[in-house]
Amino acid sequence: MEGIARKSVPSFNALNTGMTILTSDQFDAVVGQTKPTIVLFAGRWSSLGSLVAFKIITTLDQDKVSIYQVDIDSPDGANVAERLSIRQSPTVILFKAGVPLLRDTDLTDEMIQSI
């Protein structure tokens, strides 16, 4: 479309949110913590993943909850996503002591209030 400027949505990595990328080797130990742990399963290409990441980082008190990302674009991250039957990007899961307590394709206000 000529004459219409397209605005680029930043990729997840471009947000520089500080989320740690989990590998399959780290995953079980990290989500097994007693401290609640939020894991965002998203691809680098996902603009919606970028928005959810921004919402997580700016809304949650990181002293109360650990926050991580699994990069589903990488073979290692895809293995973790497959193990948990992740079929949609982004997906957010709240774990505590290795147990998935909440799972959603977006971080809802209800999910935030329950943490």
Image (tube, grey):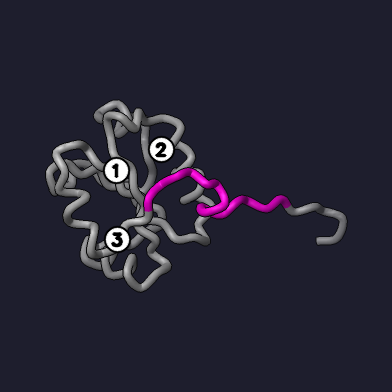
Give the crowd class for mark 1: few <14, some 14-19, many >=20 residues within 10 Å. many
Q: Are marks 1 and 2 in contact (CB under 8 Å)?
A: yes
Disc 3 from disc 2: Cα separation? 19 Å
Q: What element carries label 1?
A: strand
The residue carrying mark 1 is 38
Relative vertical location of residue 4 with respect to residue 114 in this rendering, above or below = below
User: x, y (%) of residue 2?
Assistant: 85, 60
User: Residue tagged by mark 3?
Assistant: 86
Q: Give the range drawn in magenta.
A: 7-20
Nearer-N-terminus badge (1/2): 1
Kind of residue at disc 1: Ile
Q: Which of marks 3 and 2 is in front?
A: 2
Q: Distance between the residues labelled 1 and 2?
A: 9 Å
Question: In the picture, which quadrant includes the C terminus?
Answer: top left
**Is the residue marked by circle 3 packed among few (<14), some (14-19), or many (20+) residues within 10 Å?**
many
Instruction: Tell me the number on the disc at residue 26.
Output: none
Q: Position of residue 83 (x, y in %)?
A: 21, 66
| Label 2 Cα neighbours within 10 Å, binned few <14 / some 14-19 / many ≥20 | many
Please tell me whether mark 2 sits on a helix, a strand or a loop.
helix
Is 3 contained in the magenta span?
no
Q: Looking at the image, which residue is at 41% across and 30% down?
A: 59
Residue 4, given in percent of the width and then of the height, sits at: 82, 53
Q: Nearer the viewer, residue 27 or 42?
A: 27
Q: Main secondary structure of the magenta part?
A: loop
Q: Which mark is on residue 56?
A: 2
Disc 2 marks a residue whose amino acid type is Ile
Q: Quadrant of residue 72?
A: bottom left
Going from N to C along the chain, the mark reached first, 3 or 2, is 2
Which residue is drawn at the image coordinates 52% and 47% (left, top)? 16
Report how far apart the C-alphas of labels 1 and 3 lie in the structure: 15 Å
Q: In this view, does 77 lie to the left or right of 15?
A: left
